[in-house]
Image: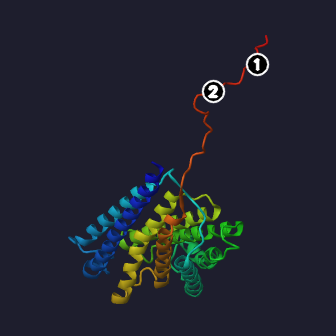
Amino acid sequence: MNQKNTYTTPTVLFVGSISSVIIAFVAGVLYCIAYHNSYETDIRHFEAGAVLPYVFGVLMLLSAVIFTVSSVLLRKKYTLADSVPGSAETFALWFCGLMFLIFGFISFSGAHTEGSSQLGALCTGALAPLAVVSAVPFFLRTSEKTRNTALHAVFSIVPVLWGICLLFKYYFDLKEMPLNDPELTLTMVSISCAVIFFLCECRISMGIATPAIAAFSSSAALCLTGSISAARLVLWRLDGHVLPEPAETLLLFAVAVLAACRLLELSSSMAPVTKPETEEAPVGEAVTEPASEPFEA
């Protein structure tokens, strides 16, 4: 019975992850086609009667439902053991850390807050230093001496703060994208999934993460953040689509690459939850209870 549980649930997780990734990839292709054919830059919206944007939304929702269900199946059945990053994850960690540094340096030199609200300007100004510091935990995880230490755990909180600050910047600073722009909705969804992934990485550095949380956060970052950022990179090359900025899109794509590596190595770091064995009395031997002390009035 235990052997069946050991192999059935990871198989369901694998099938669910592959299915959600394929659906998200198809949704990303449809997003590129829909933006190229029916997005009107003057009104910052898709033209009336366009069907592909709705199909894209349905597919993204279906992908989210699939990887959520497959992640729930791991609940209370497996634990997440500490694992040494492989070559692919190490490359993704360096890639993500370098993209944070590049984003920080670009933000230092090109942060424009004219016409922004006070909170929007504050968030825009804080993005550059937070991005530079956010690169530290990714570099710390590549070393065996600094991985999952107290220093690593403290710095792992910074990417979460960076993502929240970026969300506030887009919400309160409407000079780039108005609230009714579908591009703003996709941007908020992409960043939110990245923040969820950063939260899980923070829990992993503290040793309190579970396979269900790791699978959900990695799948969300890979399927939603990855498909949106990859599609925008394609549009950037084809149509000169630059919202959001290429450095930010490349950074979110690097997060999706790291999430893919995390999802691939998740099965090797999972262990079934084992119940403590209880001592059983030999067959034929009566189980004696300890004698109770006499009651004194």
- Label annotation for residue 287: 2
Please tell me whether mark 1 sits on a helix, a strand or a loop.
loop
Please give left or right for residue 130 compared with residue 218 in the image: right
> What label does residue 245 carry, if any?
none
Percent from the top left, x then y, of residue 190? 44, 70
Residue plotted at (47% across, 70% down): 264
Task: From the viewer's side, name the closer residue of 293 and 58.
Answer: 293
Q: Secondary structure at mark 2?
A: loop
x and y percentages locating residue 241 in the rendered image: 37, 85
Q: Residue furthest front?
A: 284
Total marks placed: 2
The disc, 1 or 2, on the residue closer to the chain's N-terminal end is: 2
Residue 181 visible in the picture: no
Q: Is residue 150 above or below residue 3?
A: below
Q: Which mark is residue 293?
A: 1
Give how far across and how far down residue 63 sits, in percent: 35, 64
Q: CA distance from mark 1 to mark 2?
A: 19 Å
Q: Callout 2, which amino acid?
A: Val
Identity of the residue drawn at 39% across and 70% down:
186
The crowd level at tag 2 (other Cα within 10 Å; few <14, some 14-19, many 20+) is few
Which circle, 1 or 2, is nearer the viewer?
Answer: 2
Mark 1, Cα crowd under 10 Å, few <14 / some 14-19 / many 20+, is: few
Q: Hey, which quadrant is residue 122 in on the image?
A: bottom right
Is 16 on the left or on the right of 195, as rendered? Answer: left
